[in-house]
Amino acid sequence: MFGDIMGMMGKLKETQKKVEETKARMNTVLVDEQSADGLLKVTLTANREIKSISIDDSLLEDKEQLEDYLILTLNKAIAKATNIHEAELAAVAKEGMPNIPGLDSFMK
């Protein structure tokens, strides 16, 4: 019985390490998004850190339009990055879960 518990504890520690490594790797996964007309482009990491913003000069003439473009484009990029982030972490967490009957259907 204690062997099983120790084995599970070791597996959980290993999974925790893999989760931390995956989070660090997400800093190198880049997500690009642009406005529908391509006048605004943003790049973020899968950890949702903004790496670059490119604004066409024509958008600099209308502050309100620029703000709208930034909100829409950044929100789309953040949603993409969040999906990647969550999928990667879920895969690592599922891989490290102990084999408990019925748990697989519960996690879906």
Image: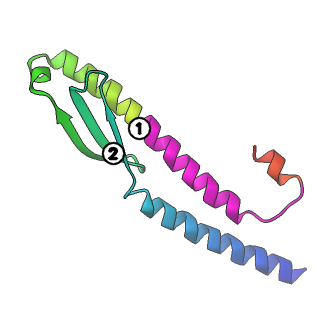
39 sits left or right of 92 in the view: left
In the image, farthest residue toward the front:
37
C-alpha gap between disc 1 and disc 2: 8 Å
Q: Which residue occupies 89% across, 57% down?
A: 101
> For mark 2, does the 10 Å Cα neighbourhood hold few (<14), some (14 to 19), or many (20 or more) residues?
many
Label 1 close to label 2 by CB (< 8 Å): yes
95 sits left or right of 102 in the view: left
* Viewport quadrant of the N terminus: bottom right
Q: Is residue 14 above or below residue 59?
A: below
In-front residue for pair 75/55: 55
Q: Which residue occupies 69% across, 57% down?
A: 94
Three-letter code for the amino acid on which mark 1 is drawn: Ile
Residue 40 picture location, percent across and down: 23, 29
Three-letter code for the amino acid on which mark 2 is drawn: Leu
Q: Which residue occupies 81% across, 52% down?
A: 104
57 sits left or right of 41 in the view: left
- At mark 2, the secondary structure is strand
Q: Is residue 42 above or below residue 57?
A: below
Query: Which range is magenta?
Result: 79-101
Residue 38 picture location, percent across and down: 25, 26
The disc placed on residue 44 is 2
Residue 3 picture location, percent across and down: 84, 83
In the image, farthest residue toward the bottom:
3
Which of the 4 image quadrants contains residue 71?
A: top left
Q: Is residue 46 above or below residue 57?
A: below
- At mark 1, the secondary structure is helix
Helix, strand or loop for the magenta stretch, by majority = helix
107 sits left or right of 22 in the view: right
For mark 1, what is the residue? 78
